[in-house]
Amino acid sequence: MTGFFGRTHELELVRAAVAWAPGVRRLTAVLVDGEPGVGKTRLVDEALRNIRVDRVAVSAYEPEMRLPFSLGHDLTRALARSSPAAGQILDPILAPEPGGPPPDWTSVFEAAHRAAGVHDSLVIAIDDFQWSDERSTALMHYLVRGAEADGDPLALVVAGRRSLALGALASSLDRLLGDRLTRVKLGPLDQRSTIALARAVNPALDPRDAAAVADRSGGSPFWTGLLAAARNDEAEVAPIVADRLSAAGTDAAVLLETITVLGRQAAREDLIAIRGWPEDRLTAAAAELMAAGLLLEEGGAFRIVHDLVRAAVDTQLPDERRREIQSRVATRLENIAGDNVTLLLRASEARNRAGLDHLALTLRILRSPMRRLVGIVGLRSIVSLIDSVPAGASQELELQAELASLAAELGQHGLAMERWARIADRQVTPSDRARAWLGASESAQQLERTEDARTHLERARRAGSDDPILHLELQATDAAITRWRENRPQEAGQLTIAALESARALAAAIRSEETLEPRLQSAYERTLVLACVDAMQANDPEAILPLTDEMARISAGAGIEAWLQASLRRGSALTLLARFAEAEDQLGPAWLEARRASLPGIALDIGAWLAHTRYDAGRLIEAQEVADECEALAERIGEFSRPALGARMWRLVSTISAGDHQAGLAGLRAMCEDERDPHHRIPLHLAIARWRSRLDGAASADEVHERIARGRHDMEDARCARCSLDFIRAATESLARVGYVDEAVRWFEEADLSPPRGDLQEWDHLRARSALAAAGRGDRALLQDAIDEADKLGMGIESIWARTSLALVKAGEGDTSGAEMILRDAAAIAEASGATTERGHVDQLLRQLGIRTWRRGARAKTTGDLSVLSDREREVANLIAGGASNPDVASALFLSRKTVERHVSSILSKLEVKNRAQLAAKVAAGDGAS
């Protein structure tokens, strides 16, 4: 390879941007764009040569831009090889163990984000990005969003021609990074550099001939190199390639054609297998091509020197030769693919282009445990392949059924319903007909097409199958349609009970030493989840606990997802029963394992409940941490699902207590305005009314009254017993606090009609009664009862508000000293919890009583006194004292770097130390003292 000429300014721009990322510990990006032949690849290679940062480099290829995740396939595997820690994260996703959960795109993307984040700093370089496929482009956006949200020091260097893919990435990076995005537009080389390059390629050129080459090349480094070394001066690639090949042997030409058809760099072992040559024959052919300046070898792989050369060879390639090479390529890919659907699709495309039968391979893709990774683009390709098969041909029905099943897994329910309906009545057996109509019904349900869902379900029943597991599946689907689509919760509950009885009977018929058939296990688990939902909405959380025990029992050995689902259901029930420590024992490990397994969907669900649990338990910092991690995860996957929105609500409630109540309330209002489901607006109305009434009292009466009126309307539409009772009790408190006492009494009369179930509901009921008592409608002893109950349950935030209510009553009765004592206790609890807003509110009440407020200063014993730290802060402090960097802490505790930075800042402030060395000394002193 010749030296590097010109581009001094551009080279420094790229190097500076790459060096900036580790320095500022933030994401930086460089986009290099220009026309073909201007030297984009060479510039990036030169800029990144000898950098002392971990580096991952991949390229996109034109022939593969229609294959799903082609670039992403190479990038994820390069990330997995980038470090042992990255491999531990990605390998289980890229090659899952048999029987494990099949990965989906969010799992792959999340694992790639985490693998990139394990590095102290990392450069990802991507060449020819204009050929990136849709799914791989989505991965790049995901990595960018994730690195920015988590504060990972990632440098992204992307080179390519102007294209939709590059333009979309540039727009996204510009919005996200601002001045941390560097744009490098490459034009022609200057005349002096072009002449120097020509003479370096061909030292025999005199200055006049070199200047002529520079003029003909137009300043293109690619053309300069070709023309300088050519035996003629034609400015066309094909004649120059032919001229260079003229002195090479037949094997060299065949090898060049083979790499051209592959359309990508080719590993030495792949070429040996495709051509069937011994290694020395391949080496000789490659050496001739490299001597001719047509081929490069990098890391044991060969690539054609430039896309323009590949295109010239491709244009001249006879169809018969192309099909012969495609056949060889297909055979090689099939032999090495295993369950890698990206390679299988490459093989399928190759067989198709070779004119060979590809149906067996298509069926292999559809049956692969990795099949979800074909994505929407790959699904469209499979549709075209299957639609080319005449109806009634061998395996056609089987292919259609697998296609419908995959379409449903990928959320393409319109396609799934159409394919199931197309083949249902053509199925031979009653069970196959019923399964097809059941699939159509379930897809219609997802499309919210209630009438079609019900019609297809009835057709499934009329098919007359005697399969008992299928009968259970039909029962579960009936219950789901009745609850979610027809909004008949009572009837749905009865159907769920019947389905659960059927599931238990089927399981009981199996001998104890035998495991449940996967279909039965899946249907049983689904029925148990429906039963848990019924119990929760029927306001009977105690009933969920035995159901989750049953779920854990039948899912034993079924994999992590079943365990996570059981932990989620049990943990949420325990939270609703105010058994917070037990709930933490369920949800905490599940939250960690869901993220380790890169299962973002259920991780968000668990995280939302864990944030709820920790907030109710007065663990404000830990609640914010989980909610922040959920928010970052939802942003990375680009989908704010229902659990993600639940976590956001608890983040905003935590924000209120943490000191920024205006921002928290504004966020809750915005969520409420955006929410279309009346069921999910109820807790938002509740939170807004509660916090406005607590913080602003009678001044908030208008908004509180409006929120409660709107909540009443949504409550009636949703018809959820639990949410209704929660809202009624909360409305009692809020109305009493703003002075609408008579109306509050009427609301509480409704609540009194339904006895509370579990400690949390007992507390909610007592809180409402004590609010009435504080307003003069009830026994004042209830105010002390509320304090005692909140303390007993460990509900720190609520105990503060219970104390303020009693203090105000005592102050109104003239007992200022008694009020002060209670408020001092409330202030201490607020300070220990990090509840800045509550602490400020207590200080305001003290000042209204004419009492001087105070803030807790340094403790008498500061050295080694770590009791001011939360449990999580103590974990972080211990790791730092042991020499861990912020990335080490993030990896060990499964936190984002930004979360770790916030913890470190808080720890240094609380312990009144200036740096990590002083922190380590303080931790050592504290451990010695203990």
Image (spheres, rainbow, N blue to C red):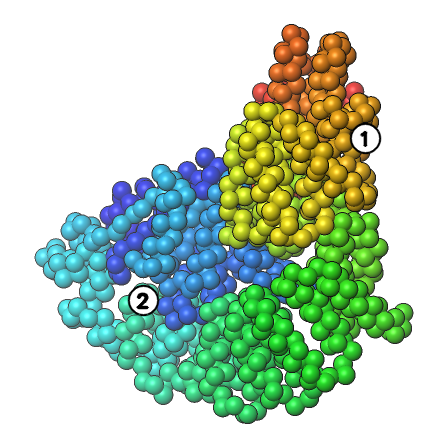
Amino acid identity at mark 1:
Glu
Disc 2 versus disc 1: nearer the observer: 1
Q: Position of residue 587 (x, y in %)?
A: 73, 46
What residue did someone put label 2 on? 307
Please tell me which residue is depicted at 50% across the width and 47% down the height of the picture: 674
Q: Of 14 and 914, which appears nearest the observer?
A: 914
Q: Quadrant of the C terminus?
A: top right
Secondary structure, mark 1, is helix
* Kind of residue at disc 2: Asp
Which residue occupies the foreground of this view, 305 or 838?
Answer: 838
Instruction: Point out residue 166 in the picture as x, y percentages from the top left corner.
Output: 35, 56
Work out whether 1 lies above or below 121.
below
Q: Residue at x 69, y 33 (%)?
A: 744
Q: Position of residue 889 (x, y in %)?
A: 63, 38
**Can you say whether 781 is above or below 846 in the image?**
below
Q: Secondary structure at mark 2?
A: helix
Residue 329: give x, y in percent of width and height.
46, 79
Q: Residues within 10 Å of mark 1 (few under 14, many from 20)?
A: many
Mark 2 and mark 1: Cα distance apart in space: 74 Å
Q: Toward the viewer: 857 or 231?
A: 857
Indicate which disc residue 789 carries.
1
Which residue extends farthest left? 208
Are there few (<14), some (14-19), or many (20+) residues within 10 Å of tag 2?
Answer: some
Q: Residue at x 63, y 11 (%)?
A: 847
Whether residue 75 appears in this view of the structure is yes
Mark 2 vs mark 1: which is more N-terminal?
2
Residue 880 visible in the snapshot: no
